[in-house]
Image (tube, grey):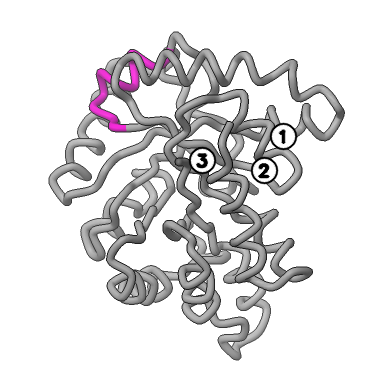
Amino acid sequence: MTKLSVNVNKIATLRNTRELEIPNIAHLSRIALQAGADGLTVHPRPDERHIRSYDVDALARLLGEFPRAEFNIEGNPYHGLIEHCRRVRPTQATLVPDATDAFTSNSGWQLGKMSNDQCETLRYAVAELHEVGCRVSLFMDPLPDLMPLAKELGADRVELYTEPFATAFAAGEGESQTPHYAAAAVAAQELELGVNGGHDLNLHNLDAFLSAVHGVAEVSIGHALIADALEFGMAETVKRYLAICRSEK
């Protein structure tokens, strides 16, 4: 069964337009968890454009009430991610190679192009997070040849960057991308790496993705899910995504 982690960044984006703590992230996150979400994801950035440090702490406290749910903190390990993880000890840390001024995550780790020093620095970050007790996932493009490198760095999982699939699917060409993802997933699983997926997955393309890419452990979905919640409500939206995640493929 594929688990659903609800990324709540966009709730924070809306809240940050005022100083009223409306909408309240912890309240809406509780609704998502009560509706059956398997966990929460946040991606705090140094400029705190959405998630702020106190949100990370508040959600960690909330998840203490839901012992089966997981907390996934994602971000660049060199931009404060490790400090957040040391403080609240999430279940999973997802390492993303985004620049401080990146609009959104737009690429996986280019492990084959990194210098030895860069690889060693990343390996050290993975080891630090393991010491904290985190499962570590690397945000990766769907390139099978890079999976052994992720394994060598000590990763437990990879999160496949799904925007190229989502873009192709919206253009009616999703089948042109799914073989790449399926092959990358197989390559990872053969190395005993778990496989996650995330970025621009939604109610329209999620079933096609999970049907083509077998054994996905978790999907992290934020932008589309929060947009759907404006129409259907948070609880109903989570249930709709869970129905797809839990359907037989």
Judging depth in this view, the residue of 133 and 18 nearest the camera is: 133
Residue at figure coordinates x 45%, y 39% from the top left:
96
Q: Which mark is residue 166?
A: 1
Give the image quarter of residue 120: top left
- Whether tag 2 and tag 1 are in contact, CB under 8 A, the answer is yes
Pointer 3 or 1: first along the chain:
3
Query: Which secondary structure type mostly characterizes the magenta part of the structure?
Result: helix
Whether the magenta-drawn stretch holds residue 154 is answered as yes
The answer to whether mark 2 and mark 3 are in CB contact below 8 A is: no
- Mark 1: which amino acid? Ala
Q: Amino acid at mark 3?
A: Asp
Q: Which residue is mark 3?
A: 98
Residue at which label 2 appears: 200
Residue 130 image position (x, y, % from top left): 18, 42
Q: Nearer the viewer, mark 2 or mark 3?
A: 2
* Residue type for callout 2: Asp
